[in-house]
Image: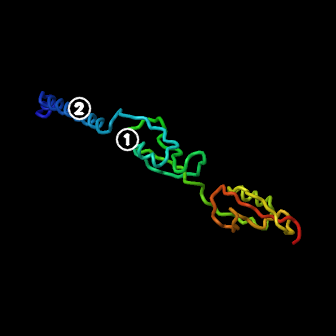
Amino acid sequence: MNFLRFLFSKTLLVQFTLAFLVGLLFVYLTLSFLKYITLHDEHQKVPNLKGISLINLAQITADKNLRYQIIDSSKFTPNLPPLSVIEHKPSPGQMVKKNRMIYVTLNPSGYRRISVPDVVQITRRSAEVTLLSVGFFIGEISYRDNIGKDMVLEMRYKGESLEAGTLLQKTAAIDLVLGNGKRN
């Protein structure tokens, strides 16, 4: 009987009301503190960094209260300067908080180096298709006395004899020395 009387007493009701009000005050103060700490509603636009060189990137991001991290150096893009930004995440114009990390993809310093395929002792047509499919260009074509007409006798790069397997920059022009179909 005393327990039931206590459940419906004024004292318990006052204690529950005080506990509820203290709880509300605690939640309000916590949310206000988090809003202040996380800089809620304080955004800035991400600048367009495409084409910016790596040297200038640090200064630009520091001026905008941003940070950057290089995540990739993808395939070479010839219409942008070497070691410049190709793309970045978040994208230009997006709203971010200050001190946000911008993930940057850079243009490499040049085309990658690839192995020269062996095209000696095959026809000109096959050699050109093989070299072009790998990413090389065909430079000068010269002829030498040899019974194999239009057969590749030698590969050259910048006047020097070139062996199969040599690493050259992609898009390098390889000169071919072909047979003219005449005996020595």
Tell me the kind of residue under disc 2: Leu
Foreground pick, 164 / 154: 154
Q: Residue pushed farthest front?
A: 159
Q: Is residue 130 left or right of residue 102?
A: right
- The percent position of residue 16, horizontal first and vertical second, equals 18, 32
Q: Which mark is residue 24?
A: 2
Q: Examine the rendered structure and indicate whether residue 15 appears above or below residue 154.
A: above
- The percent position of residue 42, horizontal first and vertical second, equals 35, 34
Foreground pick, 89 / 31: 89
- The percent position of residue 59, horizontal first and vertical second, equals 41, 44
Residue visible at 23% across and 32% down in the picture: 24
Q: Nearer the viewer, mark 1 or mark 2?
A: 1
Residue that badge 1 annotates:
65
Image quadrant assignment for residue 62: top left
SS assignment at label 2 = helix
Residue visible at 46% across and 38% down in the picture: 47
Colour scheme in the image?
rainbow
Q: Is residue 97 left or right of residue 21?
A: right
Q: Quadrant of the C terminus?
A: bottom right
Q: Is residue 70 left or right of residue 168?
A: left
Tell me the kind of residue under disc 1: Asn
Residue visible at 58% across and 51% down in the picture: 76
Q: Do the CB atoms of the residues marked 1 and 2 lie less than 8 Å apart?
A: no
Alpha carbon separation for disc pair 1 and 2: 36 Å
Q: Residue pushed farthest bottom?
A: 184
- The percent position of residue 102, horizontal first and vertical second, equals 44, 44
Image quadrant assignment for residue 32: top left
Residue visible at 69% across and 57% down in the picture: 173
Foreground pick, 30 / 42: 42
